[in-house]
Amino acid sequence: MGASLSNEIAINAENVPFSDQISMQGVVRERRKLKMAGFTTLRRKFIRKRRCSKSCDHGRVIREFVSNWTPAETRSLLEEYEALATLKDLTIQAELARPPAATYKQDLSTLYDFKYCTDVDLIFRGACFPVHRAILSARCSYFRELLANYPSYDAQICVDLDTPSIDVEMFSALLRYLYTGDIGPKDGDVDLALLRRLGDELGTPNHFEQDLRYLLDTGDYADTVLVFSSENMVDFRRLSNNSEFGFRPKLELNCHKAILSARSPFFRNLIQRRSRSGEEHTERVLHIQSRIMLDDSVIPKRYAKVLLHAIYLDTVDLSLILRGSGCTSSAGSLGEVEALTNTGRSRPTPLEEVMELYQIGRFLELEIVTQGCEDLILEWLTLETLPAVLRWGGQPHGSAWVYRQAKQFLCEEFSQLINSPVLAQIDKEHLIDCLHSDFLQASELEVLQAVLNWAESKLIKSMEDREPIVMNQTPYSVNRKNGRKRDVSDVEMREILSDVLPYVRMDHVIPPNHEILNQAIRRGLVSAPPSHMIGGDQHYSRVYAWIRSQMGLFVRPRLFMPYYEEIKTIVEEQMAHSADLLKVRRVHYIPDIANTLYADSKLRTAYSSQSSINEMLSYSSSVPVPDNATMNAMIKREQKLKSAPSCHRAMCLSRSSRREINRQIRLRVVREFNLPDSVADLLENACTKCYCGNTISDEENSTNDLPMSQTSIESYPASSTQHVMTFPRSTFQRRSKRLPAVVPEGTSYLNDVGSSSCSESQLSDMMPDVAMATANMSLAQLSLTSNGSLSRVRARPAELELDLGDGAVASFRRSRRELNRQLDHWLSSAVLSHGPARAIIAPQRIFILGPSHHVRLSGCALSTATKYRTPLYDLNVDTQVYAELESSGPFEKMNISVDEDEHSIEMHLPFVAKVMEQYKDSFTIVPVLVGSLNPEKEAMYGRIFAKYLADSANLFIISSDFCHWGQRFRYTFYEPSWGDIYQSIQTLDRTAMDTIETLNPPAFTEYLRKYSNTICGRHPIGILIQAAHHLQKMASVKTKMSLKFLKYAQSSKCLNMSDSSVSYAAAALVFE
């Protein structure tokens, strides 16, 4: 929805005759036109070529400044500008982002689907179609005549069409066409020729907008009256000559419940509430229209026709604002902009009216009105209106979207404000936001001058406020005002500038010895002069303040377009005359180099501003958390934006910061979903968080952001007959030597195993057998996989590798014999809990339940693969059990890429294959990926799996680690009375194990609620407990069962808060 006014409109309309203001009101351009023109308007305002100041040739200034630089130094500066230019494009897209307001076609299609406020039923071939009399009567002559014969409410009318071959699906498509004017994707493959024959029989409808305009203008078939009246709906309050008879006038407008319900959740809820209360039934019995009373002090009647016009036609026509007696704004209306501007006018300006209309649109939940008003405000945004728009947009009742555009406008037009009286009206917080931007369109000298002018104007105003001017209308007062500048106190100036001046980049003020800078220094206004004035080599101080070096003087330059264009020209000239630039070493931006030592330093920095974990949790609780469906949709949208060419170009630049790029993409996503900016932090965690507690930084997970051309991927033809999961998989990874369970995915690490706190020598005596085997496998020959979009095109390589998860892949390139030898060694190290056995009954199928670490799931998911290929032999998936589980309902399907990336299931497969090698042709596997479940869902899945658990032919394997402790896992629970930190962790885990052994689901749920222990397999464990609990309650099951933990260990002993560890435990559920 967009808006525009004619160019002749002046915002300050105090001196414009009232009669002329009506003719000056423009009409909001319609949505379909604004799809082409709306963005052009924004481009003209924000991306247009800069108008350089006539008093300063910025190109000449920057050229003279870099005249003695080397070609490499100039090229380095250009790289900074290029990175900023790509970041600015992404920033503008994020600032412009907002959810599109639904059109009347979309809303009426939803109305047809959800059947709000239907008043008649059509019966066709035994199917019932609840519809709306007004819409069908206005759209189709056949239905108009048919419905006229059945005027009663809730009438059931049989429809008999002469056109043959019309089925229920075609009839539904016809009704949807009448509701929307389009054949949508929901209607499937519709025979258009048949639809045309239906049109000939039923009567071809008019253009959809024409029929809606007919309903609006005539009020035919209206079943509702909107009544705009005084407070408490009193129509007989006497006023001073506001009407002919001395009573407050009221306004009544006919409309249709169907349209109101479709366009506004506010009206829909109101109508449904009245229907439930019985009021609507009474009105139908009496054959009278429903009356919706709107308080004129909240929603002024003068906007009534504007609102209805927008509801019916998606346009906001300001010429429909009612003028005249009884239509003035009430003192208690939603429009508070008059108080904000402090003008004292009795009649609002057009801009103030649009602001008030925006607030009414928000109150009535009319997105088409709010977005139209936002675009109107943006059309009217000028230097003169900027301060008022900034103040209004920053208020809770203002528009966050307009506020962002106003701040962007301030940055773009900053050079025009330097000597403008408008500068004094800019609030300090808005000025600081502007100075903080890397995209401020002014030279740093102009920025310094503007800041000094702003501080002077603030000081003069303060002096005038505390010293009343006597004889205000005399020549004396004029002379006194002119003398204010000479009386300005430098001490007070410094105090005003103290919060603002630090944002001026003094090292970038050029020419370096300009008089404005020197005078500010002499007056003591600049407490920290540029580095080249402090001492040392002035040349290098000036150069290294603009480009990156080891001297630590670098300050990021602003993307001032005249500087950028001139530097680009200079580099092109130098490249034509010198080959030195070909030898420039392109050093990557430092923040993008991954931390190679356990990723601790980055994570400590991330949390250094928080005094405790409680503060972090308190912050998270203040952010509205989207539901799983919304979060998954946002993640998909983010991945799509990251795969765009513009994002790839930004990522490839040597000076780009992936953190800033990803931040802008996430802001764009959350704004498109109409969520507050704070949700971007949650989205970052959702995209980079391993669900057992591990996190991945933007920089560490940068492999996903690389263009496909930078990654070597082999191509293998996919099978057309079956899906096969291949272990091992891809081989284009980096080396790593870390325990998989404690390695953040995507991180590059040092090759020195000794630097790890989880080395084999530390774990061999304390880890459970399976966990120790996992550690040894990870220490063999590990390399990092890349996830995300690359995993979907990952090929099946010729060499066999086994993916153990968390980004670690154990590569068994030597032979199958070597793998057998390793597995034999690890399994022989296991201590027998029972035995020796006299007989073994091998299971026919093995269920493997593992938690989802990389994909948000609200339930359980089944694989699309039919077999899992291992170096030993193929493990076949039990398709019969899969079919039974799918028929039960609550199971999703995970695609191959999700299955490949998940390690919780596949890390058990080599052990299963080895132990069951003698029975490899007589058993199947049932892999199940478990998402984030609430206790009710755990109980539901427990009941489903109970019958399989009771079957002695089945074996269940539950994949889980125990406590992930440390700041890197965002879990630092510590009870000092339990001893050292590692002892506290052990007591915490022992409490969990004791609780699990009771097979009491509520007790385990309460334990997790109390301690929030980061047990990554808590939901698969919960399903197992629920299944066992269900079996215990069944009278037909007489088997006694007991669960006992066999072994427990920690990856390292934590002694201080900077340490981290992962706990491991092994347990067995025995049926006796």
Image (cartoon, rainbow, N blue to C red):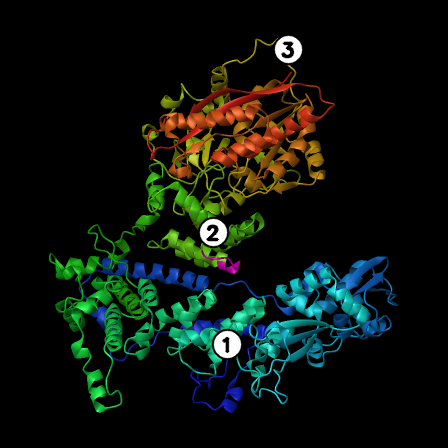
Vertical relation: 737 (above or below) 642 = above
Look at the image and give the residue range highlighted in magenta. Answer: 671-677
Which quarter of the figure is the N terminus placed in? bottom right
The answer to whether residue 489 is seen in the rendering is yes
User: Which residue is the site of mark 1?
Assistant: 331
For the point 43% across and 86% down, which residue is it?
Answer: 14
Q: Which amino acid does label 1 sit on?
A: Ala
Write down the quadrant of residue 289 in the picture.
Answer: bottom right
User: Which residue is the site of mark 2?
Assistant: 623
89 or 831: nearer the eye?
831
**239 sits to left or right of 680:** right
Task: Give the number of the mark in front: 3 or 2.
Answer: 2
Task: Give the number of the mark in front: 3 or 1.
Answer: 1
For the point 16% across and 62% down, which residue is it?
Answer: 529
Query: Disc 3 versus disc 2: distance between alpha carbons?
Result: 58 Å
Which disc, if any, is residue 693? none
**241 sits to left or right of 42:** right
**261 sits to left or right of 302:** right
